[in-house]
Image: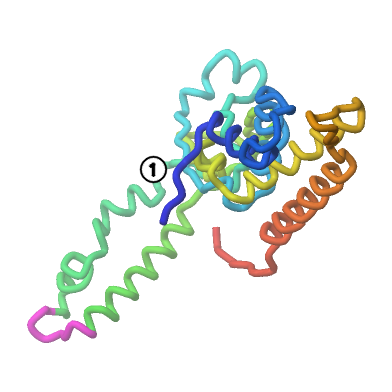
Amino acid sequence: MIPRAYTIQELIDVVQGELTVSGALPRLLPDLEVRRIVENKAAPFFYQHYLYAVQKMYYHVSHKAFKTDEYTKYRYIQLPCEIQTISWIYEVRNTNLFSIGINAPNLSINMGVTNQPYLSSYVTTIGELGVYKTILDSFSDMLNQMSKYTVKFNYNQMNNRLNILTALEGDLVLEAYANVQEEGLYSDPMFITYVTAHCKRQLGNMMTRYNFQLPGGVQYNGESLISEGNDDISKIEEEIKYKGNSSFMVMVKR
């Protein structure tokens, strides 16, 4: 079952439910403080370190962006704020894969195999056609790799400015990792636990700073809340670092 996406207010209600034991205790941590923790602490950390908080996206940048007064003066363009990192930047030229497709339109079985002068669908079996198709696909991948023009660049995620360090002749295609939608992040169980842990620690700090006493003479144990919050934060951050630093590697040719 796919979890339902939470809005920011629904996330705050879930966290407050954890802090108050489903309303058994009064709300002492304001909703505004929970929102601040979500937006200023938890979300930036997850977007920068959590494997599933970003997704690969491709962005097209027209060559016209490099003819503006801003780029001419400062040598940078402004990118959307949801982009965290950029893996590669490819320049679109006339000799790239787009023009190769004119000479070999689809490299399909019909157009790339049976149209050969010495091959005919009457004498070849489907197994042989599959072999020929695999060979042509490999050839297409090789041409694709050889026809990619990468660009040297420098990207500052803090201000979302992209500096191009090489000369350009055409449009650009950016291979980047961008933030997932906030609603998707807010519904992640690990994110909810992380926000709750920060709220526990903040509530514990407030309890130890001021002498709070509930009706009936019951008093919060601020030190216990701080300790519990710190333990949960450490566990989640260690798990995120473990997932983000897997030893599994894939070597690809660019």
Along the horizontal axis of the image, is 144 left or right of 203? left
Q: Nearer the viewer, residue 2 or 55?
A: 2
Along the horizontal axis of the image, is 221 left or right of 179? right
User: As displayed, is residue 144 above or below residue 93?
Assistant: below
User: As displayed, is residue 129 above or below residue 56?
Assistant: below
**Mark 1: which secondary structure?**
loop
- Which percent across, then down, holds residue 142? 44, 65
User: As displayed, is residue 121 above or below residue 82?
Assistant: below
Which residue is painted at 63% across and 36% down in the image? 23
Along the horizontal axis of the image, is 188 left or right of 243? left
Residue furthest front as drawn: 216
Q: Which residues are magenta?
A: 120-127
Which residue is painted at 51% across and 33% down in the image? 7
Residue 242 visible in the current orientation = yes
Residue 69 occupies quadrant: top right
Residue 13 occupies quadrant: top right
Q: Quadrant of the N terminus?
A: bottom left
Residue that numbered label 1 is attached to? 94
- Which percent across, then down, holds residue 168? 54, 34
Q: Quadrant of the C terminus?
A: bottom right
